[in-house]
Amino acid sequence: MPEFSTPKPITVTVTLNKGRLSVLAGDRADTTVRVRPGDQSSAADVKAAEQTHVEYASGRLLVKAPEPHWLSGILGKSAFVDVTIELPAGSSVQIEATKAEVRSEGHLKDVRLDCVSGEVHLDHVELLHVDTVFADIAVDGVSEYANVNGVSGKVRLAEVSGSAVIKGVNGDVWIGESGSDLHVSTAGGSIFVDGAGKGVTAKTAGGTIRLGRVQQGEAELLTGSGEIEIGICEGSVAWIDAHSSTGSVRNTMQAKDGPSQHVDMVKVRARSRHGDIMIHRASESSQASG
């Protein structure tokens, strides 16, 4: 098992065809890499693990699995490797994979993932960049910025302190808490945001849009077919422009004194071709996930 002295955070590049990657970040001054076959009884997996290249120099770690034989890809029998990397917290990781299961524990700085398909579950990262075709993405926390581009799959971000852009996904999107501007645009699927500190743009060709709590900024919510629900925080004044072509619009907000007596203002623009729209006051415990 390769082991390197790394007293500071490092930059890692991992290239996999088919496999599993575990990145464990913690308070440590070294980095270890363990490569194992996905199936010990598979000659192809054993060979791929043995041929996986690992090298480290000047703060950069490279882990590269061998390219599969062209016939293996056609037959769907590509070798599977299992890679575990333990490294200093605050390190950055770039991953390129065809089909992979990726997970992380601990704090990472910059995570960039480019994969065709797989499942991704990350702990806490500062910066997140994901490009995928068919993958489910789950992240416990993003402290600065998140950018997710996909074709099909679910996206779950429990907390995003900075801004976030999620687009192209055909699947449900759930955001727990968003601290800055949030932009979500999907080809299909529902969009749920439990709480938004600032502006939200949520657009889907078909699906429910539910915003549990919004405190300030602009909320633009558009769906071709589906319900829209938005909760306005207590103490925030709202300007509302809502319309549904075939559904009803229900606004239970109570008229209060002018905006001068309020710190925050929310500007709401909601549109649905086929679905009801509901606007109401939100409680601190309001959640959008259904």
Image (tube, grey):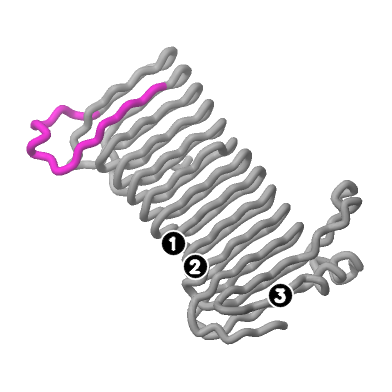
Circle 1 sits on which residue?
126
SS of the residue under disc 2 = strand
Which quarter shows the N terminus?
Answer: bottom right
Q: Is residue 283 left or right of residue 31?
A: left
Report crowding for label 3: few under 14, some 14 to 19, many 20 or more residues within 10 A (C-alpha): some
Q: Position of residue 28 (x, y in %)?
A: 52, 83
The magenta segment is 253-271
Q: Where residue 108 is drawn, which disc sits there?
A: 2
Q: Which of the two marks, 2 or 3, is nearer to us in this view?
A: 3
Asked where in the image residue 209 lies, by quadrant, the reply is top left
Q: Residue at x 55, y 43 (%)?
A: 149
Report crowding for label 2: few under 14, some 14 to 19, many 20 or more residues within 10 A (C-alpha): many
Q: Residue at x 50, y 22 (%)?
A: 225
Query: Mark 1 or mark 2, which has the lower sequence index?
Result: 2
Q: Position of residue 87 (x, y in %)?
A: 56, 77
Asked where in the image residue 141 lies, by quadrant, the reply is bottom left
Q: CA distance from mark 1 to mark 2?
A: 7 Å
Q: Nearer the viewer, residue 81 or 52?
A: 52
